Image (cartoon, helix red, strand yellow):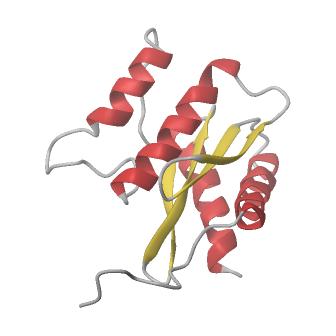
């Protein structure tokens, strides 16, 4: 087995913009202004959109969801261990919105050729809306 893997897929800025644009299109379709973050495989922010009318308080939640999905290599609604919540995301959401019910849906890793190359995180809607917009953004890479 090689010690270094070369020519591994990487998310480019143009790819991040395509994911962001697809997510924004879906948010417009469902008529929900949202915050959408796209990060690379290390959780570094590549692209971000705060749609007109999106809740300012959910900016950090979108970024936290994207980072958690990238670093965990799994959607944010999948428990870290069977029967346990995703504590990293839940804590981030609790800090950002202590007066509201926290959710962890809406963070999805971006996978190409079996490699996680980044993630999208969405916030400002319901749990289902966040997840729907995140799936639409992730599909932009699958369709390319």
Q: Is residue 40 above or below residue 140?
A: above
Along the horizontal axis of the image, is 14 left or right of 74?
Answer: right
- 81 relative position to 96: left or right: left
Q: Quadrant of residue 18?
A: bottom right
Taking depth in this image into account, of 87 and 5 the one nearest to the observer is 5
The furthest residue to the top: 99
Residue 22 drawn above or below residue 81: below
Residue 138 drawn at (x, y percent)? 60, 64
Q: Split into 4 quadrants, where in the image is the N terminus?
A: bottom left
Please tell me whether residue 92 is drawn above or below residue 28 in the rendered image.
Answer: above
The residue depicted at 72 percent of the width and 67 percent of the height is: 15
Give the image location of residue 71, x and y in percent: 39, 52
> Residue 132's image quarter?
bottom right
Q: How many marks?
A: 0
Residue beneath the point at 43% across and 80% down: 114
Q: Position of residue 43 (x, y in %)?
A: 50, 48
Q: Quadrant of the C terminus?
A: bottom right
**Does the image show residue 134?**
yes
């Amino acid at each position: 087995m090689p010690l270094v893997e070369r020519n591994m897929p990487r998310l480019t800025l143009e790819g991040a913009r395509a994911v962001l644009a697809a997510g924004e299109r879906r948010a417009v379709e469902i008529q929900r202004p949202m915050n959408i973050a796209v990060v690379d495989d290390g959780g570094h922010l590549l692209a971000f959109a705060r749609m007109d009318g999106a809740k300012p308080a959910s900016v950090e939640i979108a970024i936290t969801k994207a980072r958690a999905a990238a670093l965990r290599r799994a959607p944010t609604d999948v428990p870290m261990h069977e029967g346990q919540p995703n504590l990293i995301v839940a804590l981030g959401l609790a800090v950002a919105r202590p007066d509201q019910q926290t959710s962890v849906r809406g963070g999805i890793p971006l996978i190409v050729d079996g490699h996680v190359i980044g993630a999208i995180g969405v916030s400002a809607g319901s749990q289902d809306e966040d997840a729907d917009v995140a799936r639409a953004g992730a599909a932009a890479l699958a369709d390319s």
